[in-house]
Image (cartoon, rainbow, N blue to C red):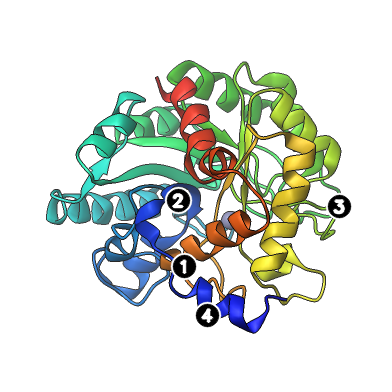
Amino acid sequence: MLLRYQLREVASVNNGLYSVADAHCDTIYEIVKQSKQLKKNDLKVSLEKLLTYEHYVQFFALWVDDAETAPFASVLQMLDIFYEELEKNKENLCHILKASDFKKTFDEKKVGALLTVENGKALMGSCDNLRLLYEKGVRGITLTWNGANELGDGALTENGGGLNDFGREVIYEMNRLGMLIDVSHLSEQGFWDVLHVSDFPIMASHSNAARLTPHPRNLKDEQLSALATCGGVVGLNLYPAFLSTNGKADLDDCVRHLKHMLSVCGENGIALGSDFDGFNGAMPEGLNDAGDYGKLFWTLKKAGWSETLIQKLTCDNLIRFASCIIK
Ligand SMILES: [Zn+2]
């Protein structure tokens, strides 16, 4: 636990000191569902909050529930709303389509938005749909959600089978197009299959260390190590159930997981993947929404992390990883 005086100090952190790149949030889904605005809202992520930082790149996931009966149409609907938001906020928001767009958003002091689809079910078993999503500006796919889909088995399936033929076809095509492959939510066998099949590094956009918090959504040390050895990154998920075994978490639990991920992945393999707006219930104490990230970075500084290491975690690693793939 943080000491009381530290919490007071944490409250006065200046976000403007930090650049952030976050690999996963579900805010667009919530904006569509609750008819909210991206600029100002009571969700965990709003443009207003992201603009308090020096730079901010957010990977916005378009989430498809395993139970969705019209998955492709549902993604198209979220894409429509995203493009409306992009138009309304063009002064402050830039859609990231290729590597050079990262620098452009930084130079123009805009928030960078990279679109991913969470759950390959959206493809409805067709690589044509994958190519259509690419054309519409999607640059990454989380291959499964918790259940099984046309690509393979998710982390919460009973037997946890691997990638199937269509899943392999999707990997080849994503490699060819230059799309980010996300193995968060995939079964362990699926994880190893993807690592074997993909010609490019992969990410686990929002998963933590199973060594500290055993949960099928977290990654074992062998997985973390292999992912990083291949040039991939893992993004810290803020969902308390993935941060501590009793389901309650605070900033220190985030630091604990980050330290462990650092020890296994090395300093180029760690990133952020909040999962903001992706779960209900309590947030880690001290980290209620995207506006609070500065408190985590401050806590890492107090724990002895160098400026360079913090910068790699908070921004540089994810941008480097994505830049070598989306070209
Ligand atoms: Zn998720």
Rendering quadrant holding ligand 1: bottom right
Query: What amino acid is at disc 4?
Result: Arg
Query: With respect to residue 256, does 221 lie above or below?
Result: above
Separation of marks 4 and 2 at Cα, in angstroms: 34 Å
Is mark 4 in CB contact (under 8 Å) with mark 2? Answer: no
Q: CA distance from mark 3 to mark 4?
A: 32 Å
Mark 3 or 4, nearer chain start: 4
Label 3's element?
loop
Amino acid type, mark 1: Asp
State the image quarter where residue 224 is shown.
top right
Choose the circle earlier in sequence order: 2 or 1.
Answer: 2
Q: Which mark is residue 8?
A: 4
Measured as percent of width and height from the top left, residue 47 is found at 28, 60
Q: Amino acid at mark 3?
A: Arg
**Tag 2's secondary structure?**
strand
Q: Is mark 2 within 8 Å of ligand 1?
A: yes
Q: Which residue is mark 1?
A: 292
Question: Distance between the Cα atoms at labels 2 and 3?
Answer: 27 Å
Gap between marks 2 and 1 measured at Cα: 20 Å
Image quadrant assignment for residue 220: top right
First in sequence: mark 2 or mark 3?
2
